[in-house]
Amino acid sequence: MQSKKDNSQMHHTTGSVLDELNIDEQSRLELKLKADLHQDILKLIKKKRFTPRQLEAILGVPQPRVSELLRGKLSLLSIAKLLYYAHLLGARAQIRLKSPEKAA
């Protein structure tokens, strides 16, 4: 049996996948911030071993909202909501700005 030749091209990403998206810079930065907050919240949930039922009670939201959080549906979650969830889970948010790195 003769195998078909794969003519598709591969795209290699340098850096963040978000940088490769064709979206405006403000939206890209917001998405990066949401992703970072979400990852930190998931780490906190895992560390404290919260169950989805416990999260419903702590966050004061129904099961579908907990599922959206756990599954990373970031388009449905605002930065303000993620910060509030982190607060309810016992975390203290701190925002730091860094100077841009100089090119080598």
Image: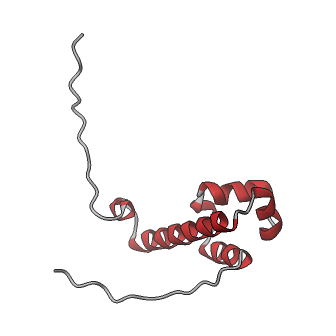
| Residue 97: quarter of image | bottom left
Q: Is residue 24 above or below residue 65?
A: below
Residue at 75 percent across and 57 percent down: it is 52
In the rendered image, the residue lying farthest to the top is 1
- Total numbered badges shown on the rendered structure: 0
Please provide percent x and percent y for residue 8: 25, 36
Identify the image's colour scheme: rainbow, by chain, secondary structure or one colour: secondary structure
Q: Nearer the viewer, residue 17 or 46?
A: 46
Residue at 69 percent across and 68 percent down: it is 48
| Residue 22: quarter of image | bottom left
Q: Is residue 43 above or below residue 87?
A: above
Please provide percent x and percent y for residue 61: 79, 64
Residue at 46 percent across and 70 percent down: it is 32
Q: Is residue 68 left or right of residue 95?
A: right
Q: Nearer the viewer, residue 89 or 30?
A: 89
From the image, which quarter does the N terminus lie in?
Answer: top left
Residue at 23 percent across and 21 percent down: it is 4
Q: Is residue 77 left or right of residue 26?
A: right
Please provide percent x and percent y for residue 101: 27, 84
